Amino acid sequence: MRVLIVDDEKLARERLKELLNDIGGYTVVGEAMNGAEAVEKASELNPDVLLMDIRMPGMDGLEAAMHLMGMENPPSVIFTTAYDQHALDAFEVNAVDYLLKPIRKDRLANALTKAKKLTQKQAREISQARAEPQARTHISVHLRGNIRLVPLPDVVYFLADSKYVAVRTRAEEHLIEDSLVNLEKEFGDRFLRIHRNALVATQSIKGIEKSPAGTWQVSFKELDTRLDVSRRHTAAVRRWARSRPKGG
């Protein structure tokens, strides 16, 4: 069985490698120090299972697991954690394996034997068990079976088109299978709804201006593109523009 070890602490990674060597029958195909690196290496190395820490700088293990589920053949995930017992109860309820640090050899062997794939429902419920639920730090784009992570600060706007949503950055555009409703719920504090089909990053807005046709449009700092503001959202968008800090 091919294993990818994910932990920001080198000693923790070394400990897991020693335990796997003692147990036998497992090959460590790679290591990662954070969630984003884990997604990248899992897409490249196709491990059977990830032994992944939860609390890591940048992208944590829970968000990484949610991105990994978009793979054509996602690996099983066993979380390693120092969470308190209250949080661990949530993992038990959702039948997702975890290893409580410091990790014991017999516990690791048992977890690997019964490793299960994480489902979307389980990931959402486990994420909600955090003391403070967090929005994703990246958007995952699926390209020919691989995963491309787009940092949320790079997104200029989300634009709905049929069953897909276009994710526009300064340099490129990708399509994702998500809904603007879900994106607005998750990232609403950083994005502004200007149309039923458009969410724009407030940090990317250059101005709100009238077009020659008399309709309101949003212009951007990074792009020459302008997006229309619908009648329904005009009042809210203009209120946001008036309350915007000077120079923001």
Image (cartoon, rainbow, N blue to C red):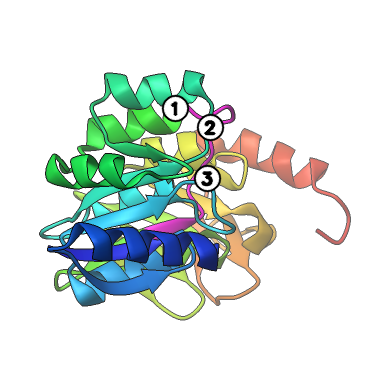
> Can you say whether 186 is above or below 169 in the image?
above
**Proximity of marks 1 and 2: CB atoms separated by less than 8 Å:** yes
Q: Nearer the viewer, residue 239 or 178?
A: 178
Quick one: SS at disc 1? Answer: helix
Q: Which residues are magenta?
A: 129-139
In this rendering, position of residue 238 left or right of residue 137: right
Residue 128: which numbered mark, if any? Answer: 1
Q: Nearer the viewer, residue 175 or 58?
A: 58
Q: Quadrant of the C terminus?
A: bottom right
Which residue ends up furthest to the right in the rendered image? Answer: 246
In this rendering, position of residue 141 left or right of residue 61: left
For marks 1 and 2, give the CA distance.
Answer: 6 Å
Tell me which amino acid carries mark 3: Ile
Which residue ends up furthest to the front in the rendered image? Answer: 22
- Residue 205's spot in the image, x, y percent? 65, 60
Q: Earlier in the sequence, mark 2 or mark 3?
A: 2
Q: Residue at (81%, 41%) from the top-left corner?
A: 243
**SS majority, magenta:** loop
> Can you say whether 101 is above or below 16 in the image?
above
The residue to which callout 2 is attached is: 133
- Residue 121's spot in the image, x, y percent? 25, 30
Q: Residues within 10 Å of mark 2 (few under 14, many from 20)?
A: few
Tell me which amino acid carries mark 2: Pro
The residue to which callout 3 is attached is: 194
Q: Quadrant of residue 176?
A: bottom left
Q: Nearer the viewer, residue 104 or 52?
A: 104
Quick one: SS at disc 2? Answer: loop
**Could you tell me if residue 235 is visible in this image?**
yes
